[in-house]
Every structure is written in structure tokens, then in C-alpha cells.
Amino acid sequence: MDLSVRYGPEPDQLADVFFPATAPAPLVLVLHGGSWRLDVDRGYLEPAARALTRHGFAVANVEYRRPGGGGGWPATFADTGLAVDALPGLIEGEAPGRIDPARVVVLGHSAGGTLALWAAHRPGAPGVVALAPVAALADAHRRDPEGPVDRLLGGGPEDVPERYAETDPAALGTPPGPVVLFHGELDTALPTQLSRDYADAIGAELVLVPGAGHLDVVVADGPAWPALVETLAKLSTVERS
């Protein structure tokens, strides 16, 4: 880690920042998965974050509050929005000239992919890459009624419909900026149909990764890696408004 940056006063409102040798670099904001559980944090994505610096990206590996640790509705989403809005400026302030704060991409995996898709609808949102995301929260809740979506939102779509209306990527319509989804064809944790349905509904690009499971899509130099690096490079040329 080259820098630790806090984007808020809570213990989990921080990001580990890694810089490439070249500057100013486009910035990738990484949102980790783990079913929004307290026992899974940003650490598992550090190898991928470090690997992306070798391709010329600066990377902020973002932590956020999860259910049981002050997160859930609405704190997890508030943290996501605050991180996406504030971190480019904060990083530029602490390491002037190392990043281009106008060239930002949000990259989320699994549960973090859901947060990235949600963030795509914020004003001035950057481009988004979602790896094996939970692209339909209501559908995921129906598949597992007492699972992670229930803990995140505090109930099902019949109990708290307004929360699903505000957070479920499948209910939010087409975001204003570019969105690309990656999903491993052998993913047994989250069915590829969730990503297929979402991509069809909003007209997003979907990359199905042959031979890849749920975690394979975030493995540096794994089956998704060349296409992922190419996609990040393409989206990082679009300046954030």
C-alpha cells in the first residue's frame, strides 16, 4: 500500500491506495464483495489491485460498513456514494499529481458489484465495471429469503419495497454512463442469468468468461484479466463530468 486515505470518520470508511510508476494515472475505485459480511473485507482484492498498477492504473481498494458493523441500509450505500464522490479529490490532495481525478472507473466484485451498479446512477457517476454482481436484489432475496440481501436491506421486497426501489440495480433503469459486466460461465455462487437479464434490460455490455467461477474473475492474470484490463483502459478515457 502506498497510501491510506479516510473518506469519513467511521473505522471502515477508508481505502488503501496503490500507485503505478507513471503519473498522472487513471483511478480505479474497487468495491469488494463477500455478501456484505463483516468477516470479508477488502484484503482479498489487494493482489488484483497491485496487479492493476502494472498496467498504469492507480487503484483505491475501498472499505465500507457492512451489516453488523454499522452498515446495511442506508449506511452501506451512503459509504459507497461518499467514497465514489470524495476519494478522487482526497487522493489528489494527499498525493498531488499522481492521479487524474477526472478519469475514474468504479470496479466492483459480487456484492461490491451491486454497489458499483447502484453508484452508476449517481450524478456525475464514472464508468462502472461489475464482476459477477448481484444485479437483481429482489430476485436474489427470493432465491435466499434469509440470506445476505435480507440482512443488507432489513427485509424482503414485500417488507421494505421503498428500499428495493432505491437500491436494486434491476429496478433503477438505465444508468447515464457506461456499464460493463463480467461473469464467469462456471459461477455457482451467482447464476449468470442475473447478469444476462440486467445487461439485456439496460443495454449494457456483458462479457461471459469461459472456464471461470465466481472468484476467478478477480484473479490477476486469470481468465478474465486481459479483457478486464482492456475494458478499464477504455472506460478510463471517458472523463468524469
Image: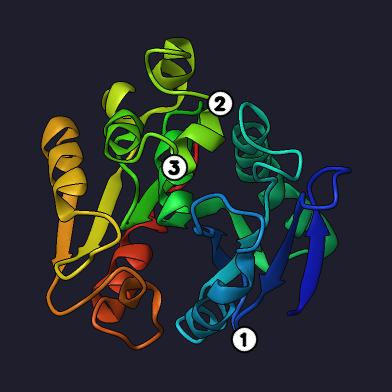
Where is residue 207 drawn, in percent x and y? Answer: 16, 61
Q: Do the residues labelled 1 and 3 touch (CB within 8 Å)?
A: no
Above or below: residue 53 compared with residue 61: below
Task: Quickly name the residue at label 3.
Answer: 147
Residue placed farthest to the right in the image?
9
Give how far apart the Cα atoms at labels 2 and 3 are.
Answer: 11 Å
Report if residue 130 is visible in the image. Answer: yes
Query: Disc 1 marks which residue?
Result: 21
Image point (65%, 32%), residue name: 78
Residue sitting nearer the eye, 186 or 202: 186
* Residue 210 position in % (x across, y down): 12, 76
Return the x and y of residue 203 as percentages of the image width and height: 14, 37
Q: Which of marks 1 and 3 is nearer the N terminus?
A: 1
- The reply to whether the C-beta atoms of the residues labelled 2 and 1 are less than 8 Å apart is no
Q: Which residue is drawn at 49% across and 18% down?
A: 163
Foreground residue among 30 and 22 = 30
Identify the element where label 1 is drawn.
loop
Residue 19 vs 80, above or below: the answer is: below
Neighbor class of circle 2 (other Cα within 10 Å; few <14, some 14-19, many 20+) is some
| Res. 154 mark | 2
Of the numbered discs 2 and 3, the one sitting upstream in the chain is 3
Task: Give, as a three-letter code, the residue at label 2.
Answer: Gly
Q: What element carries label 2?
A: loop
